[in-house]
Amino acid sequence: MKNRNRLARLCCLLLLVFPMTLIALPTDKEQPVNIYSNTADLNQKTGVNIFNGNVIITQGTTKITANQLTTYSDSKHQIIKAIAIGTPANYQTLPKVGDNLFQASANTIEYIPIKHQVILIDNAKLEQNGNMLQSNYIVYNELTQQLITKHYNNNRTTITLEPQK
């Protein structure tokens, strides 16, 4: 029972530390998306688009860098899944004006818009304001603001929380 209460307090603390972290400034969504890469293979028929080599995606204050980005679209050309692969792939955004940058990195970053889910796999790390969460597998749900780590490849979760100022 004592461990269960401690876990509940930790989960609440994490939600306070990483609130809405993977949602950028509202104005970012109004900005154009720019994709830069060494090569691009765009296939409207299959809906699979592959960008290779020094991939950089920007939209407002949001920036993603990766070695490779693959997007999967439905028949209406809406992205149903995006996978960024790097050593590591990086994601950064400004959650709100006056905040410090929120940064995430992992060897694989998967984004599934319909589920409002971001999955960080292998060497995963979240950072903001000196607070850090490291694990080999992190799942974040943008709608529920739930963050889950899983035991993956025999690595444990590490959380560093800076004192409140």
Image: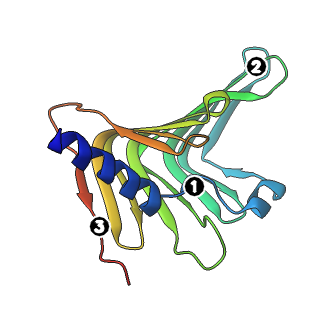
In the image, what residue type sits under mark 3?
A: Leu
Q: Marks 2/1: CA distance?
A: 27 Å
29 to 112, vertically: above or below: below
Residue at which label 1 appears? 20
Work out which quarter of the rendered image holds the C terminus and state it.
bottom left
Q: Marks 2/3: CA distance?
A: 40 Å
Q: Is mark 2 on a helix, strand or loop?
A: loop
Q: Earlier in the sequence, mark 1 or mark 3?
A: 1
Residue nearest the observer in this picture, 12 or 68 = 12
In the image, what residue type sits under mark 1?
A: Met
Q: Earlier in the sequence, mark 2 or mark 3?
A: 2
In the image, what residue type sits under mark 2?
A: Asp
Q: Marks 1/3: CA distance?
A: 17 Å
Residue 56 visible in image: yes
Residue 88 visible in image: no
Q: Is residue 129 left or right of residue 152?
A: right
Residue 8 in picture, x, y percent from top left: 32, 46
36 to 101, vertically: above or below: above
**Residue 74 got which mark?**
2
* Residue 14: quarter of image: bottom left
Residue at which label 3 appears? 161
Work out which quarter of the rendered image holds the N terminus and state it.
top left
